[in-house]
Image (cartoon, rainbow, N blue to C red):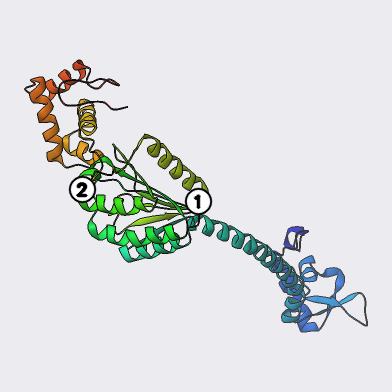
Amino acid sequence: MCGESDIPGGDGSLVEVCGAGIEFYRTALRAGRATAAEAPGCVRAFGLVAPAVDDPEALVPIPPSVATAALAHPRERLILEQQQALAAVRASMSQAESVYRTARRKESESSQRLTPAPAITAALDEAIRGTRIELLTAHPGGRRPEEVLVKALPRTLEAHRKGVKQRTLYQHTVRAHGPTLDYIKQVTDLGVEVRTVDEVFDRMIICDRSVAFIPDMGKDHGTHALKVTDPGVVHFLVSAFEYAWERARPVVYEQDQQRPALLTDETRLHVLRLMVDGYTDAAIASRLGISPRTVASHLKKVGDLLGSNSRAQLAYLTAKSGLLEDGATTDCGCEQRS
């Protein structure tokens, strides 16, 4: 006989029809009925027998397919309900997923990579056309290629016609580059403010303090750039620009000048400072936007005047001379301007 573990439990599970149950079912099939008192619990539980209509003490066999259908129906209904509940969960989560993806997409759109050069130019033109209040630009590296200046002038003129306030930063070395000075002369006559600063800063173009273009780090800035619209990042870039602007010197033309005064002595002092700090000629040239040959020329002139025989001795004599102290002047041709 089967035990309670062989029949449907409280959790709706079924185990199996026991051997005695199979024999009872076989006998019932042969005789057409069987005594109810002798039926194992499993044949009742599996629905293989049912009370006879004409004799409540007897059981008649039921086809297994009918019994299976009777057993399967409530379980199928339960499965369907679970599937519907699962579908409802997924539908609800799909809405949350849509919101999540939209938010993430907006975040990713706050920094857009631009390449190649025509894509950068098109994005810049579009941004500058939309500028209404202020345009900030910073161009490190000394002299600018003439073809770049030719492309930049129409943008500057268009912004000027709209009344956009424009400020531009270069490095001191542009004061010795004719084509860049010609460009500066044209735009300053329009009211654009131009200043130069000593050391390198990041290249950037900022429109209305809401959109910024900066180099895509580690790649050629001429063919790879980033368009940034994240307010926090743009605010940081504006702050960096303003800090450099405060340290920079205005480019001012006197009436009898063809070009603004050069800052040779100041550049030489910065060369010396970086040399004392351990920078190589190539690193100094990169930071100041000048050539390694110019760096070597500055160091040689000071070395000859101070009587040094090596780079290490020059660094020592320069530091000892007080040449790099604020406001200090010496007879070596360098003067620290305030």
Task: State the residue position of label 2.
Answer: 177
Residue 295 position in % (x across, y down): 15, 36
Residue 104 position in % (x across, y down): 53, 56
Residue 23 position in % (x across, y down): 72, 73
Q: Residues within 10 Å of mark 1 (few under 14, many from 20)?
A: some
Task: State the residue position of label 1.
Answer: 230
Residue 172 left/right relative to 188 = left
Quadrant containing the C terminus is: top left
Q: Is residue 215 above or below residue 268?
A: below
Quadrant containing the N terminus is: bottom right
Query: Foreground: 226 or 127?
Result: 127
Question: Dividing the picture into quarters, in which one does residue 9 lie?
Answer: bottom right
Question: Could you tell me the amino acid type at mark 2?
Answer: His
Res 219 visible: no
Considering the numbered disc 1 on the image, is that residue within a helix, a strand or a loop? loop
Residue 8 left/right relative to 160 = right
Res 316 visible: yes
Q: Is residue 127 above or below residue 193?
A: below
Q: Is residue 70 above or below residue 338?
A: below
Viewer-side label of 1, 2: 2
Residue 297 position in % (x across, y down): 11, 34
Residue 104 left/right relative to 78 = left
